[in-house]
Image (spheres, rainbow, N blue to C red):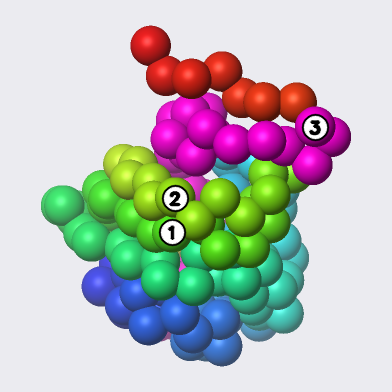
Amino acid sequence: MGHRWAAAWSEHDADAVAGIFHDEGEYDDVAFGVVSPGRQGAREWAAGFLASFPDLHVAIVGAYATDGLEVVEWRMSGTQLGEFDGIRPARRRFVVRGVTLLHVRDGRVVRCSDYWDRASVHRQLQVENLDGTRDAPPH
């Protein structure tokens, strides 16, 4: 399932991301504190993220699966071409590592929880926010 998940993101296909979810599944982006309910919620979350990073790529670093749970370590990269998290389009690339927990039932995801460092992406973009402030440069 993790390979399907990563491929859907890397193919920039919000419908494919949503397609792996159970009807009552949930997409939980822990870095944002946002839970998107249902297949439609997953589609909307993916479409928004992909609008910000239309060249997004997710590479699997490692994966472990057991009955009903897959843990996927990944590296995500992309170029910010749309507004993201209150940051104007920067046309800068980012790379971040993360982990996703995929809870699977009947061949579909019932819960997807993404864990990644949102602040690292902000530091890499180093641009003016929509409110006119600037993120601190990386140390």
Secondary element type, mark 2: loop
Give the left or right position of residue 41, taking residue 31 as reference.
right
Q: Amino acid at mark 1?
A: Thr
Q: Position of residue 44 (x, y in %)?
A: 70, 73
> Which residues make up the magenta segment?
104-132
Name which quarter of the figure residue 136 lies in: top right
The Cα–Cα distance between marks 2 and 3, rounded to whole angstroms, is 18 Å
Residue situated in front as seen by the camera: 89 or 118:
89
The Cα–Cα distance between marks 3 and 1, rounded to whole angstroms, is 21 Å
Which quadrant of the rendered structure holds the C terminus? top left
Q: Residue at label 1?
A: 79
Name which quarter of the figure residue 40 lies in: bottom right
Residue 51 seen in the current view: yes
Q: Position of residue 111 (x, y in %)?
A: 55, 60
Residue at left 37%, top 82%? 11
Residue at left 27%, top 50%? 75
Q: Residue at label 2?
A: 92
Residue at left 23%, top 61%? 59
Residue situated in front as seen by the camera: 28 or 22:
28
Residue situated in front as seen by the camera: 135 or 68:
135
Residue at left 39%, top 51%? 93
Q: Residue at label 3?
A: 132
Q: Amino acid at mark 3?
A: Gly
Give the left or right position of residue 88, taking residue 7 as reference.
right
Residue situated in front as seen by the camera: 84 or 8:
84
The Cα–Cα distance between marks 2 and 1, rounded to whole angstroms, is 5 Å
Secondary element type, mark 3: loop
